[in-house]
Each structure stands twice: as structure tokens, then as C-alpha cells.
Amino acid sequence: SKTILLKNRPQGTPQNSNFEFIEEEKPSPKDGEVLLRTKYVSVDPYLRGRMRDEKSYIEPFEIGAPIASAIVAEVVESNNDRFEKGDFLTGSLEWKEYQTSTAENLRKVSSDENSLSANLGILGVTGLTAYFGLDRIGEPKEGETLLVSGAAGAVGSVVGQIGKIKGLKVIGIAGSDEKVELLKSKFGFDASINYNKTEDLAAAIKEHAPDGIDIYFDNVGSYTLDAAMKNINRLGRVINCGAISLYNETEKPTGPRLETTIVKQSVKMQGFIVSNYQEHFPEGVKQLSQWLNDGKLVKEETVVEGFDSIPQAFIDLFEGKNKGKMVVKIY
Ligand code: NDP
């Protein structure tokens, strides 16, 4: 049974050499434990933060210890009365082919093959991040204009789609022609901008939103945030969900900038961690499932195959190789 350890801390962009594969014996479940076989692994930008030796809302990974992320796994042996062989569980687990667990912090999910990976994306953390961030911080009102960065990714693609459900005009920013096309054709965005092909991002936003932006859902930070702020309306809301363009920086950026805009335009700018809304997760999952079943939300995933591909799939997030949620299918 293979395990992936953090070998050393990435300097700048993560590399395969930051990870180490080891071979271990398949463990045996003790009393009260289940033996799990990993089926789907979520790779996420925030894991980059956990690879730094820095205090955060979540413990950093230790060098020489396994990486962990959200995983869907199958119970292959059970000494726990809550679960039986063949059940599928999800929660935070280690990057191991097989592992034992008391399953205390895991929950059972439907074993329907077609919906397993959705628990890591649209019906999991990224879907909930989109739902609660937009709703609770964005406070969207029909007819308003929403700008989303990282728009073709797991969080961004759901933010834009929910924006359309709520009657907003939605503009997305993403990194390729294929992605900006997808935003309009598949996710129903009103307009989209390829930041790699745009010299003046603020001007491009203005072109699509001549009356300005009421809500900016920021997944990217940095220059994209600056460009959005140049278009923010009075009483606008900025949702600081993430800043992926800064995660591999070795120098801490200064900022936030454009404070004068925040003051003059009376803008609300607020960060959040999805777990702030943990007690409301059942409500969020219920709503997202309903929209999905009604065809109002489209599920988009990039599925990479094989346990050995996990580190590369993670690295590829920073190259924009994914559309929708990046997951690794193990078997
Ligand atoms: P995505 O599926 O969006 O994958 C990452 C995407 O980011 C890539 O596909 C790429 O798309 C884009 N990207 C990578 N590097 C850069 C760069 N330098 N500049 C601009 N864009 C870049 O990941 P998630 O949906 O999982 O996460 C999106 C954001 O949400 C992240 O910032 C993450 O940290 C945050 N997040 C926050 C949570 C919270 O609780 N606050 C919870 C979950 C996620 P492209 O081709 O368009 O460049």
C-alpha cells in the first residue's frame, strides 16, 4: 500500500520532488476501526498553505508525514458497527491507498458511482464555499453585477452559476480561450475575460460592466483584485475567498491596496473560511443538490487517474490545467 509524504517544503511553485512515495504494509483495522481503500482524492490550492511552516487556521503538514485532503474511500473491512463493507465514506484522510480509521470525522455518502466525486466538489467543500461566500458575504440582489475570478475552477464555476440563478449579471475571468468559452456556453455567464490575453484587465472589465461591479468574488488576489477594485460600485461587496496568484510567492505582498477606493465607495471587503458555516452545511448541500437535480447547476470535473498522479494533479492547479473540480480517481 502506497503513501505520499511531504518530503520537503516547496520553495515557490510546488514540484514533484517535494513529495515522497513509500510502500507500507496494508494495515489491519482494530476494534472500532474500518479499513478504507481510497477511491477519489481532492487536490486543492489551500494545501499549498499547509506546506508552509506557518500558523494558520489549520495545522501545517510535517516534513516526513503523510499529506491529507478530502477523500472518498470505500470500506473494505469493518470492525465498526456504524459502517459495513461496501460503504463509501468521505472526510479528511491521508494520501494512502489503504488506511484504517475510527471514522469519527467521516460521513457516509451514496455509493452511486456517478456521484462519488461530487462529494469533493460541487456537493462538497468547493460547492459550499461558492454557496456561502456568495450568499452570506456577497448578499446578492437581483439585477446586480457579479465579477468572479478563477471563474472556470471548482469554486468559481459554481459561484457564477449561482449568480445566474439569483438573477445577477455574471462576468468571469479565467486563463484560457477554452475556459472563457466554457463559461458562457456551459455555465451561462454573460461575459468572460481571458486574463492571459488582456493587457488592461480593468478596462476589459469596464467594457463588459459599464455600470460597474456590485459584487466581486475573488479567488485570485493581487493584480486581478486591483483591476476589480477599479470597477467597484458604491456599497460594493468584495468576497475574499482566496488568492491563488500569491500562494507560490516567496515574498509577502504588501496590501491590501486601493484603501481609498474602499473608503470612497463604502465597499465591504470580507474574507471567510467555509468552515465558518459548518453548522449550515446540510442546508447548503440540500440546496446545491436540488439545483443540480433540477439542471440549474452543471457539474464540471477534471478527473486525473491513478494514485501516482496525485502530486502532479496538485501542481497542475497552479498551471490552470483543470476545468471545474480537480480530482484524482484511484480505481
Ligand atoms: P480551482 O479549481 O479554481 O483551481 C485553481 C485555478 O486557479 C486554476 O485552474 C487556474 O485557472 C487558477 N490559477 C492558478 N494560478 C493562477 C494565477 N497565478 N493567477 C490567476 N489564476 C490562477 O481551485 P478551487 O476552486 O479549489 O479554489 C479557488 C480559490 O478558492 C483558491 O484561491 C482557494 O484557495 C479558494 N478556496 C477558499 C476556501 C475558503 O474557505 N475560503 C475554500 C476552498 C477554496 P486559470 O486557468 O483561470 O488561471
Image (tube, helix red, strand yellow):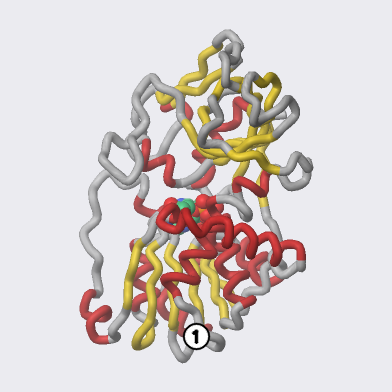
Instruction: State the image quarter where residue 289 is shown.
Output: bottom right
Q: Is residue 156 above or below residue 24?
A: below
How many marks can you see?
1
Q: Position of residue 223 (x, y in %)?
A: 35, 65
Residue lying at the far top in this picture: please name it: 25
Q: Position of residue 124 (x, y in %)?
A: 58, 50
Q: Residue 35: tell me if it is visible.
A: yes
Residue 115 located left or right of residue 155: right
Image quadrant holding the C terminus, namely top right
Image quadrant holding the N terminus, namely top right
Q: Is residue 236 above or below residue 125?
A: below
Q: Position of residue 148 (x, y in %)?
A: 50, 69
Instruction: State the image quarter where residue 236 is shown.
Output: bottom left
Query: As shown in the figure, which amino acid type bears the numbered disc 1?
Result: Ala
Residue lying at the far bottom in this picture: please name it: 211
Residue found 51% across the figure and 84% down from its top: 141
- In this rendered view, identify the residue nearer to me: 103 or 250: 103
Q: Is residue 148 above or below residue 116?
A: below
Residue found 53% across the figure and 27% down from its top: 95
Residue found 37% across the figure and 68% down from its top: 225
Q: Is residue 141 above or below residue 85?
A: below
- In this rendered view, identify the residue nearer to me: 64 or 251: 64
Q: Residues within 10 Å of mark 1 (few under 14, many from 20)?
A: many
Helix, strand or loop at label 1? It is: loop
- In this rendered view, identify the residue nearer to me: 162 or 19: 162
Instruction: State the image quarter where residue 165 is shown.
Output: bottom right
Q: Residue 178: tell me if it is visible.
A: no
Residue that numbered label 1 is attached to: 209
Residue found 67% across the figure and 65% down from its top: 182
